[in-house]
Image (cartoon, coloured by chain):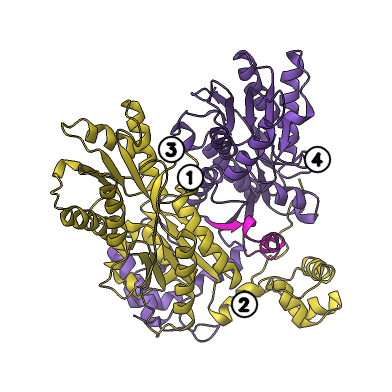
Chain colours: A purple, B yellow
Amino acid sequence: MHPIEPSFSTPDSPVSIAAVAEHAGVSVATVSRVMNAQDGVRPKTRDKVLASVETLGYRMNYLARNLRTAESRLLLTMVPDIGNPFYAEIMRGINSVALQHGYFVLLCDTGADAKQERSYFDLLRTRRADGAICLDPDTIQHASASDATGLPWVACCEFDPTVAVPYVSIDNQRAAGDAIRHLLERGHRRIGLINSDERYLYARQRQAGYLDAMTAAGLTPRPEWCKTVQCLDYAAGAAATLEMMAQPDAPTAIFAVSDTLAIGVLSGLRQLGKRVPEDVAVIGFDDIAVAAQINPGLTTIAQPMRALGETAANLLLQRLHAPTVPVPGILLNHQLVIRGST
Amino acid sequence: MHPIEPSFSTPDSPVSIAAVAEHAGVSVATVSRVMNAQDGVRPKTRDKVLASVETLGYRMNYLARNLRTAESRLLLTMVPDIGNPFYAEIMRGINSVALQHGYFVLLCDTGADAKQERSYFDLLRTRRADGAICLDPDTIQHASASDATGLPWVACCEFDPTVAVPYVSIDNQRAAGDAIRHLLERGHRRIGLINSDERYLYARQRQAGYLDAMTAAGLTPRPEWCKTVQCLDYAAGAAATLEMMAQPDAPTAIFAVSDTLAIGVLSGLRQLGKRVPEDVAVIGFDDIAVAAQINPGLTTIAQPMRALGETAANLLLQRLHAPTVPVPGILLNHQLVIRGST
């Protein structure tokens, strides 16, 4: 093991950036570029500078820079479930834009500990992070109803149109309508909905889209065709399916509001010996990568996950660079992707 | 939009923590607890303190604390592909241990930009982060062969036993052997291997496990039964399967070294009209959540993903708290999980 020597025992390091530059035989600007991880320094020079930094015990210029610029160069990303590929793909979009602009992304797994939620926003209040992108619908709702609306953050997917927090999402009502119209075109009349909790705007919008399309087709959906789940995972989709299919006159088609739920629906139907799509058709939402891999392939409403992440990051950067300029809410396009499950 | 007023225009804020305490009518210790996101402060008190912080323009105590303790309270996690549920589950383990100990996890998506790799270690060199956990086998190899071995980081899954970098992994050779012995017990003799590149230790160990088990059964695997892929995703698994099955005397069973690959194998076999497990049996590696959901369920070697992440984080914390004490390498147990695909 090579121990790290604690080279800096006092808060006020007596070593200046000029001393490092002299020791390494380079300019102060070059030392600064190395310490700020900027391009344009040859690897050899970089190594020489870092060797001098270590030898002399120079440090804290980041913090000094932070003191001057009041920037941490950290962006928070709050996700409810990093195990859900939907969020992972969005995070990839956020991360790529952040890196391009010299920011690092701090992962905040809000699902891991609800108590942390408040302390994540405290990172903004105390300027340990410059801004945040929130993907957790619960956190978005809590923060939208609190003084956190004054902090630099962006809502992604879920949002509250009544507060001045920038957001990016899709038109959830129309997207859900498109899913149902596809099932109607396939001849289905008894269509089940497995939805997220109605306390979320996106869940209410998707339910409205479902009802719109059913009503337009002259159908009155029965309340027992609609199931609410508290968690959008495989197990929840399977459990809701077993309940739904236990009814008399059970649906011949099921719309689940995430692909993870829909994959659970396929699993539940298999347990019941139902064939997909012959006995029951299934449509999901998101278009995570595995949706194209399973058998049958999952028909779904594709969300532009990467673009959602990139747009959220760009909105946040706009907000940070010009705090007084209003940042618009943005709705991106969705797309129906037809595969074997319908 | 509620703009954030840049309340702190000078690096040396004249407002002391004592002034905040007086303004809020609380003790200095309470202000300190709030600013350090510690427990034991009532929400009302917390809000009062933060209001005073904002009113007075107090800030920078984090940075001052950093100057004193030389700690950033940030841990890096370098992942090659956050879209792979295997890494997401490990990250969840890392994150939970980090939060318990008052650290935040900085996400470093090494797959996004290989050039960033070096700059992530520079975050350690310049003490912007306290330590790192690396899950990217390429990065682990590069860093193990560089002066980065002296920095506080831990290798997870892939490792280099010849350098003094703490690691956690599983016994890859025995795990691969267990997969092959399971296929042999099912009566298979022509067994294909879809493996990662042999430049990685884990790939060489899994190949050794494959060869051990085949040889012990008196079989001589043909070279054309072994395919190497550069990326462990669905598409790579499907492509390798199409190649492998195009041979005369094609394998009757395939061992793919990740579940994502194996799900691609199932997809490839479906394209070829092959039934699983009747025509070809398939076994994967990892036991990501979706492996139990697909049809047929995927037989696999389960890695203890969450425990890998938790152990990696604990090893790193040990390293940080006692830099001179050698930290051991740890191998956790794997498990054969039998489902419908074999």
Magenta stretch encompasses residue A323: no
- Circle on res. A162: 4
- Looking at marks 3 and 2 on the same chain, the residue that comes earlier in the sequence is marked by 2
What residue did someone put label 3 on? B296
- Label 3 in the same subunit as label 1: yes
Q: In front: mark 4 or mark 1?
A: 1
Q: Is residue B275 visible?
A: yes
- Rounded to the nearest angstrom, the CA distance separating label 3 from label 1 is 9 Å
Instruction: Name the spot of residue A236 as percent of width and height, x first.
Output: 63, 43
Chain letter for the residue marked with disc 3 in the picture: B
Chain letter for the residue marked with disc 2 in the picture: B
Instruction: Name the spot of residue A314 as percent of width and height, x first.
Output: 58, 43
Give the amino acid at mark 2. Ala
- Rounded to the nearest angstrom, the CA distance separating label 2 from label 1 is 50 Å
Q: Name the side, left or right, on which B177 lies relative to B322.
A: left
What residue did someone put label 2 on? B64
Give the amino acid at mark 1. Ala
Chain letter for the residue marked with disc 4 in the picture: A
Q: In front: mark 4 or mark 2?
A: 4
Disc 3 residue crowd, few under 14, some 14–19, many 20+, Cα 10 Å: some
- Rounded to the nearest angstrom, the CA distance separating label 4 from label 2 is 38 Å
Q: In front: mark 2 or mark 1?
A: 1
Camera-side residue of A24 and B249 = B249
In this view, B238 is above or below B174: above
| Circles 3 and 1 in contact, beta carbons < 8 Å | no
